[in-house]
Image: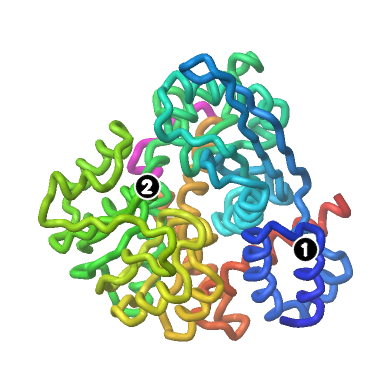
């Protein structure tokens, strides 16, 4: 890393010494900046990168709520408003026990560049809580969501900051959050995306991240003379992103053989067909059960429990052509990455946020895999959120076909942007550098135009 970018990274680590996920996101970004930093003296002069790595605003607040036993519970809420140079802050809310300030900052930082790549007018932010919705009743989730929104509503708005869902925040949670915002502010506005289609939501929003990563992968495969037909895919996770990745892969002729959750992973050598996928959707979205139930329903499949002490994830050890990590950050380490290479994988498309460690990314790139980083690959979700904002602004609702067509075109445009940018700067097929450089140039230009704010 060059002296200028290394100095910025050292400053970030010194200022926030325990925020390891944020350090990782910044380091990956700065490695791409090394490619262009010497050619952009105005960026150095205006200290654009130094400003980018510092949130415009970071909020942390107490969230008290009552459980069904009448016991008071206390959780911690967050909202990091990272950068508004291109538009209102935009990014999801994550409800998961692992949530802390480092994770929210890394997600918000990535969101800035992801949103830029969509071509829509959105800044970047992220939020959430260490609240765990698993095992909670609907009433408990509602009481928590209402308490969380009672504070958050002070800081968001349709033209200020528009949250959406993420891990642990689906249609149920968005509904409770929106209802409380409407109640407190006495307004019906597009302040949240991922709403129900009957009350301001967009069609294709639940499917968007999963569909989007497959659309981007399809563009990358086509450019290399490949298609999905007859390919075998590994998919991690079993939430919205994983479910709709499997659905779109199936529609395009590929076979998915794995899914997972925090308890372990399943392997189905026969492939997850439409009926099996419908069972997974019922299991995870309605029953809120564990993926291990899959093998009880389909005994030809196998289940491997999660081993917290293991350095490898068995899901990435099966032979396949494609891999779509769709669970959580850093789920693929260097050993897992080498397993994917050794088992014939030619493409990795990141449905989750930063699911591969820096060492794992290096292995993918050194072995010539088509590696599609999260800030490009999982931009489909926020792209359709942006389309939902447009529909809310005009009080219209587009058809499923129109939204899907727009999403497909946005993902094709993202591939063209990151591919052309990588080639322009002598980094052909390095889509990490292509994504970072293309998005940085757009955001940095807006920041310079708007002065020191």
Residue under circle 1?
12
Q: Which mark is residue 272?
A: none
Identity of the residue drawn at 60% across and 52% down: 107
Name the spot of residue 188 as percent of width and height, x first.
57, 20
Instruction: Inspect the magenta stretch and tell me whether residue 147 lies in it.
Output: no
First to last magenta residue range: 393-404
Q: Is residue 437 above or below residue 183?
A: below
Quick one: label 1 or label 2, which is nearer the N terminus? Answer: 1
Identity of the residue drawn at 40% across and 72% down: 336
Q: Is residue 283 above or below residue 422?
A: above
Please name the colour scheme applied to the rendered image. Answer: rainbow
Indicate left or right for 327 with 437 as reference.
left
Residue under circle 2?
404
Name the spot of residue 301 as percent of width and height, x first.
16, 56
Name the spot of residue 113 as percent of width and height, x first.
62, 58
State the SS at label 1: helix
* Viewer can see residue 219: yes
């Amino acid at each position: 890393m060059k002296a200028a970018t290394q100095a910025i990274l050292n400053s970030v680590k010194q200022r926030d010494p325990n925020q390891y996920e944020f350090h990782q996101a910044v380091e990956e970004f700065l490695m791409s900046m090394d490619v262009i930093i010497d050619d952009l003296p105005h960026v150095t002069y205006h200290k654009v990168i130094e400003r980018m790595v510092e949130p415009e605003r970071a909020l942390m607040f107490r969230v008290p709520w009552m459980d069904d036993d009448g016991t008071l519970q206390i959780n911690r809420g967050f909202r990091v408003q990272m950068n508004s140079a291109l538009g209102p802050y935009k990014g999801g809310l994550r409800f998961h026990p692992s949530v802390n300030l480092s994770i929210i900052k890394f997600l918000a930082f990535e969101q800035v560049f992801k949103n830029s790549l969509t071509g829509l007018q959105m800044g970047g932010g992220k939020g959430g809580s260490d609240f765990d919705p698993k095992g909670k009743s609907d009433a408990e989730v509602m009481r928590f969501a209402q308490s969380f929104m009672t504070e958050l509503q002070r800081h968001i708005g349709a033209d200020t900051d528009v949250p959406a869902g993420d891990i642990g925040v689906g249609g149920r949670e968005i509904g409770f959050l929106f209802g409380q915002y409407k109640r407190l502010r006495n307004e019906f506005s597009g302040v949240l995306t991922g709403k129900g289609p009957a009350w301001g939501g967009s069609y294709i929003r639940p499917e968007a991240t999963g569909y989007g990563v497959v659309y981007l992968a399809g563009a990358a495969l086509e450019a290399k003379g490949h298609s999905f037909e007859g390919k075998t895919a590994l998919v991690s996770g079993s939430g919205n992103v994983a479910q709709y990745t499997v659905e779109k892969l199936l529609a395009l002729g590929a076979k998915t053989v794995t899914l997972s959750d925090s308890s372990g992973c399943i392997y189905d050598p026969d492939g997850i067909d439409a009926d099996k996928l419908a069972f997974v959707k019922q299991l995870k979205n309605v029953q809120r059960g564990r993926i291990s139930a899959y093998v009880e329903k389909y005994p030809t499949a196998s289940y491997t429990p999660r081993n917290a002490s293991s350095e490898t994830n068995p899901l990435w050890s099966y032979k396949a052509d494609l891999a779509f990590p769709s669970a959580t950050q850093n789920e693929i380490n260097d050993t897992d990455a080498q397993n994917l290479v050794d088992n014939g994988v030619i493409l990795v498309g990141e449905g989750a946020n930063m699911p591969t460690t820096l060492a794992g990314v290096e292995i993918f790139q050194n072995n010539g895999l088509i590696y599609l980083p999260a800030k490009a690959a999982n931009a489909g979700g926020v792209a359709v959120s942006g389309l939902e904002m447009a529909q809310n602004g005009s009080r219209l609702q587009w058809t499923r076909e129109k939204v899907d067509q727009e999403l497909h075109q946005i993902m094709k445009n993202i591939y063209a942007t990151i591919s052309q940018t990588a080639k322009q700067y002598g980094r052909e097929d390095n889509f990490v550098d292509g994504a970072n450089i293309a998005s940085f140039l757009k955001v940095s230009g807006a920041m310079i135009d708007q002065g020191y704010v």
